[in-house]
Image (tube, helix red, strand yellow):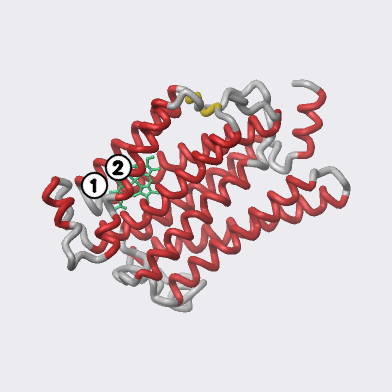
Amino acid sequence: MSKINTARNKSKPLAHSGLYWLFLLWTCFLVAWGAFVRASGSGDGCGTHWPLCHEKWADLTWPLQTWIEYIHRVTSGLYGFLILGLLVFCITKSIQKKLSSKDLLLCVGVFFLTLLEALIGAFLVKKGYVADDTSPIRAIIVGFHLLNTLILLFFLTGLRGHDKDRTPLFYASKPHFYFLFLFFFLISVFGSWASLAHEFYPQFSGSFAGILADFNASSPLLVKLRIGHPILALAFALFLFNSQKIHSKTLAFGFLFLQIIFGFLNLSFPGNWPLQIGHILFYLAIWISLCHSFWHYSAQDSFRTD
Ligand code: HEM
């Protein structure tokens, strides 16, 4: 590794790869467990109490749904302390002039986005926007929640140590990366709405007649919108497969391919939680690969120029 790279890595708050993967995997676990809370119908496992469940620290007589929701809260709480530790570390390094202002900004961003994530979660619980609540405001907040998670992951991956010998999964110009990010945001928001629609109105047959039935005048807006998610997702995949401007490694295509397979399976078997979690895990894999690739070329300032 060159001197320049070593110097850059020293200043990176998560230069130690073990520590970086701890932060990253913990974040992914929380996202997947959050999806499991919803998919298993445990969203109101703790009633409208927050942060404790039914105002207790623990109770062996709680039903399974309460434990599922409680585990999400405990692991998110511990994560909060981890992120606070990261912030203190970054501020200390910055005072010692051993951290770039960009990395300090990323650290502060991760901290505030984590805080916002917790506040959104608390708001959903306190206001009762959980379980079978079908209000449009819940759909808006859930979409925003997912966007917040994506941005949090983007900032977190920016704190990783840099290794110029790594070969990222995506190679593109900076504007193309931004385009992919925006496209991904849109698919995500529509995905979160598809999830809600599937939860409340699972009677989707997947046939052409079933799709048309979604557009009945009496259908709720969420149902009318749910077809938007697979359309956008397939457009995204086609764009990536055909683009001359974005180079993707086989593994990236593999993630995308599996994501689409899981998407179709989710469509055919609504409410099947292992399929829902599989869809979320490949989703995270694609997003993290995109972020890693972006930061890799950003550190070397070697994005594609054509
Ligand atoms: C680029 C590819 C894709 C991405 C990034 C993506 C992303 C997502 C996301 C973020 C969710 C929300 C998950 C949650 O809130 O728990 C979701 C849900 C869903 N997606 Fe996709 N998706 C993709 C492809 C597809 C395809 C091709 C289909 C169908 C043909 C599909 C069908 C679904 C369904 C049915 C749900 C609701 C699952 C549930 O009941 O929770 N997805 N997707």
Picture coordinates of residue 37, whole percent (x, y): 38, 59
Pointer 2: what residue?
263
> For the point 52% across and 28% down, which residue is it?
170
Q: Quadrant of the C terminus?
A: top right
Q: Under 8 Å from ligand 1: the CB of mark 2?
A: yes
Q: Under 8 Å from ligand 1: the CB of mark 1?
A: yes
Dot label at residue 267: 1
The correct choice, above or below, for 68 with respect to 10 in the image is below
User: Do labels 2 and 1 touch, CB within 8 Å?
Assistant: yes
Give the amino acid at mark 1: Leu
Q: Is residue 303 left or right of residue 276?
A: right
The correct choice, above or below, for 13 with respect to 217 in the image is above
Picture coordinates of residue 80, whole percent (x, y): 61, 59
Judged from this view, the residue extending furthest toward the front is 306
> For the point 62% across and 46% down, which residue is it?
156
Residue 81, picture quadrant: bottom right
